Image (cartoon, rainbow, N blue to C red):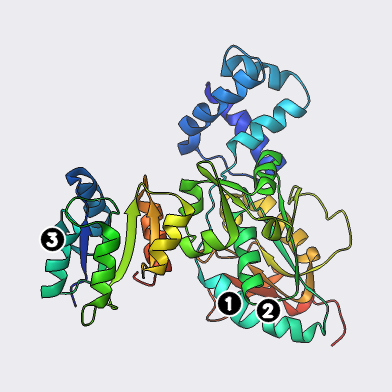
Amino acid sequence: MTVRTCLIVDDSRIIRKVARRIVEGLGFEVDEAADGSEALAYCAATLPELVLVDWNMPVMDGLTFLRRLRALPGGDAPKVLFCTIETRADRIAEALTAGADDYVMKPFDGQILESKLSGAGVL
Amino acid sequence: MTDEDFDRLQALMASRAGYRLSRERLSLAEHRLGPVARREGFETVAAMLQSLWARPVASLGWSVIESLLNPETWFNRDRAPFQTLTRDLLPALSKARDGRRVRILSAGCSTGQEAYSVAMAALEAGAEFELSAIDLNPRAIEKARSGLYTSFEIQRGLSAAAMLRWFDQVEDQWRARAELRQRVRFDAVNLLDPPADEGRFDIIFCRHVMDDMVPAQRQQALELLEQRLVDDGCLFLGQDERLEDDSVAFRAVAGRPGLYVKSPAFVRRAA
C-alpha cells in the first residue's frame, strides 16, 4: 500500500498537534513545518499528497507559500487546504484564486476536515 | 429523571414522532430538557414532566418532543446521492416530464442543509425543478427558512467555493442568498400525518430518518411517502439504511446504495 503523506504548516505547535491527530486518524503519514519557507524547502525535496497551511506565519505566509508551490515542477499535484482564523470572504476568494483546493476557517473539528478532504477528492 | 418518566417519554416520542428514544440517550435527554424547562417556566425538569403527564399533549408536549429529536445533518451528506441526482435522475426525468418541472421533496429536512444541497446541485446542473422540504420540528424549519448557518455548520460538507457562490457572510455566520432560499419551500409537517394535498413528487430524499424510528411508525411513514411519490419516482434513504421487512412498497435499486423505487404492486397507473 502506498503511504499517503500530509504536510501541516502552522506556526502554532498546538494547532499542528491537533491537526496531526485528525489527519493521522484518516490514514495519512504527517510531517510538520513551522512556516511557509520551511514548507517550501520540504516540498522542493519531496511533494506531499496533501498540505494544510495557515495564512499568517513568520518568515513566509501561507499565500506566498502556495503561489511558490504551484510554480514548482509538479507543484500542481498536492491538494492544498488553508486552515486559518482569517474568515473574510474576500480573503477566502483570494486563496482559492491562488490555487487552494479548499479553505477551512478555524476553529474546525474532525468532521469538518474529513468532509472537506472528501469533497476535495483526497479521501 | 425517574425510570417511569423515561418510559413515558419513550412512549410519547414513539407515538407522536415515531422516534426511538433509546436508553443510551437518557443523559442526552436530560441535558436537552433543561433549557426547555427554563423556557417554559418550570423550576426543574421533573416539575415540567409532572405537569406534562397530567394533561393531554399540547404545546408543552410538542416542545419536549422537538427537543429530543435527532437534528444532525450536514451539507452534501454521503455525496453520492447528489451525483446520482444531477448526472442521472434530473436529465432523465426532465426529458420524461417533457418541460414540466421535476418535483423534489426533502422529508425530515431538519435545519435545511440537505434541501439547500439539492437546490445548489440542481441549479448548477441547470435543471428545472420545484423543491419542498418538511420537518416535524418548527424550530428547525424556522432556522432552515432563515438560511443562516454558523461557521461550523457551513463548513461541514460544503466547499469554500460553493460557500462563496451561494452564501453571504453576516457577521460570524453565513446566510443563503435569496436566489437559493427562494428555491426551497419549507413547511412544518409530521411524516406520520397523511399528506394534506394531492401533490406528488418525482424524487423524495428521506435520509437518516427511518433509522431513528420505531418499526410500526417507520412502516406508516414509508406508506405515506409512497403516497407522496409518483409511480416512476425515486426515493433516497441514507446510504447505509436498509428496508428489510418494513415496507413492501419499495424495492432497492441494484448498485445504488440507498436508492429505492416503487414495487410493481404499488404502481397504480396502467402500463
Q: At which x and y percent is residue B84?
A: 58, 77
Residue position marked by numbered label 3 in the rendering = A38
Of callouts 2 and 1, the N-terminal one: 1
Residue position marked by numbered label 2 in the rendering = B90
Do pointers 1 and 3 mark residues of a single chain?
no
Give yes or no for contact between labels 2 and 1 (Cβ–Cβ under 8 Å).
Answer: no
Q: Is residue A5 left or right of residue B44?
A: left
Amino acid type assigned to the residue bearing label 1 in the image: Thr
Give yes or no for contact between labels 3 and 2 (Cβ–Cβ under 8 Å).
Answer: no
Q: Nearer the viewer, residue A35 or B75?
A: A35
Residue neighbourhood size for the residue with mark 1, other residues' Cα within 10 Å, grouped as few (<14), some (14–19), many (≥20)? few
Amino acid type assigned to the residue bearing label 2 in the image: Leu
Q: Nearer the viewer, residue B143 or B96?
A: B143
Q: Quadrant of the C terminus of chain B?
A: bottom right
Residue occupying the point 24% across, 56% down: A61
Do pointers 3 and 2 mark residues of a single chain?
no
Residue occupying the point 56% across, 81% down: B254
- Vertical order, B113 against B104 (above or below): above
Mark 3 vs mark 2: in front? 3
Residue position marked by numbered label 1 in the rendering = B84
Distance between the alpha carbons at the discs numbered 3 and 2 = 48 Å
Residue occupying the point 65% across, 35% down: B65
